[in-house]
Image (cartoon, grey):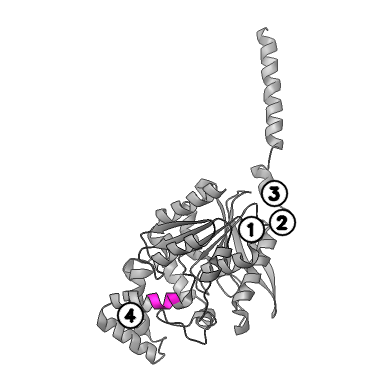
Amino acid sequence: MDKKKLTEYLIFGLIIGAIFWRSSGPTLESYYTSNEMIKQGGVKYVEITTPKGDFQVYTKRIGNNPRIKVLLLHGGPGGDHQAFLPLEGFLPKEGIEFIYYDQLGSGKSDRPNDLSLWDLPRFVEEVEQVRIALGLDSSNFYLLGHSWGGILASEYALKYQKNLKGLIISNMMMSIPDYVKYANDVLGPKMPPEVLKQIKTYEARKDFENPKYMELVMEYYYTQHLYRAPLKEWPNTLLRIFNEINRQIYVHMQGPSEFGVPPEATLFSWDRKVDLPKITVPTLVIGSTYDTMDPIHMEWISKQVQMGFYRQTNGGHLAMWDDQKAYADALIWYLKRSH
């Protein structure tokens, strides 16, 4: 075969290959194509229906992966999506798509003033409405819940796991009574006795908004078990999250104290330990050595679900901040493995 014919065959082959490649799956261009008149950089406000009317909640997509979409459920209750900001330094370069989401009453979402809305079953239905609006399904939908978000994620899985590809429970025990016991029997006694005595005195008076009470909790408890650094070294973002938390939701659902959930709080008796074997989707559980949640309990959760994996960081409750690489590595390992 002469050089001219060989060149023609090669060009023809390249053309056919290009056509096949373009038709073999979605392209970046097609993935980002939308009918929106105004581009919003991945932001989408989702309208949700509640017994008290319709509201809008904030979401924002980071990355593009049709097979891996991680919806992030922040803690609190009443916190916001900023707790997950460190993930931007790790997940996008691995091709993992994730979605920020401020739950109703939190962050950039609507903030109705109605205690009846701060109810766990209603939050579960909210997540389901968000899932549908974002087009997530069992072929791509991973749900990551951190802290209170872990309660919400596990409740969602127990009702709607047919819609999930995978579940991630981060830094949340599956029993509020067990969590309170761990705080009082294990973590509390590690504080200086005189400090713990002062904290308990304020709590007995229900003087939770006293600046001195908050100062003691922040300096002696949060710096040891939430973000492990002196307060002067805390990132401004974390301080903002604490300052902007919706206290109405937080107090109504779990109470004002880190050492006890009052009977009137809606989460007072929440316990799902016996139901964990019902979770059949691949489940990653993340615990932390210095967490407010017992890491032994966290590892136990991974052995109760039907297909569980456990990873432990060397950080505190906000391990995505104070042990960032270990936290991100656990997510990346799990998402790429189960994908």
**Which residue is nearer to you in this view: 319 or 209?**
319
Secondary structure of the magenta portion, mostly? helix
Q: Quadrant of the N terminus?
A: top right
Foreground tag (1 vs 4) = 4
Residue indicated by mark 3: 33
Q: Which region is colored magenta?
A: 178-182
* Distance between mark 3 and mark 4 Cα atoms: 52 Å
x and y percent of residue 115 in the render? Answer: 60, 84
Lower position in the chain sequence, tag 3 or tag 1: 3
Image height of 309 relative to 261, above or below: above
x and y percent of residue 314 in the render? Answer: 35, 59
* Distance between mark 2 and mark 1 Cα atoms: 9 Å
Q: Are marks 2 and 4 in contact (CB under 8 Å)?
A: no
x and y percent of residue 226 in the render? Answer: 39, 69
* Distance between mark 3 and mark 1 Cα atoms: 13 Å
What amino acid is labelled 4 in the image? Leu
What amino acid is labelled 2 in the image? Glu
Please tell me which residue is depicted at 36% across the width and 63% down the height of the picture. 289
Foreground tag (2 vs 4) = 4
Residue indicated by mark 2: 36
Please tell me which residue is depicted at 41% across the width and 56% down the height of the picture. 324
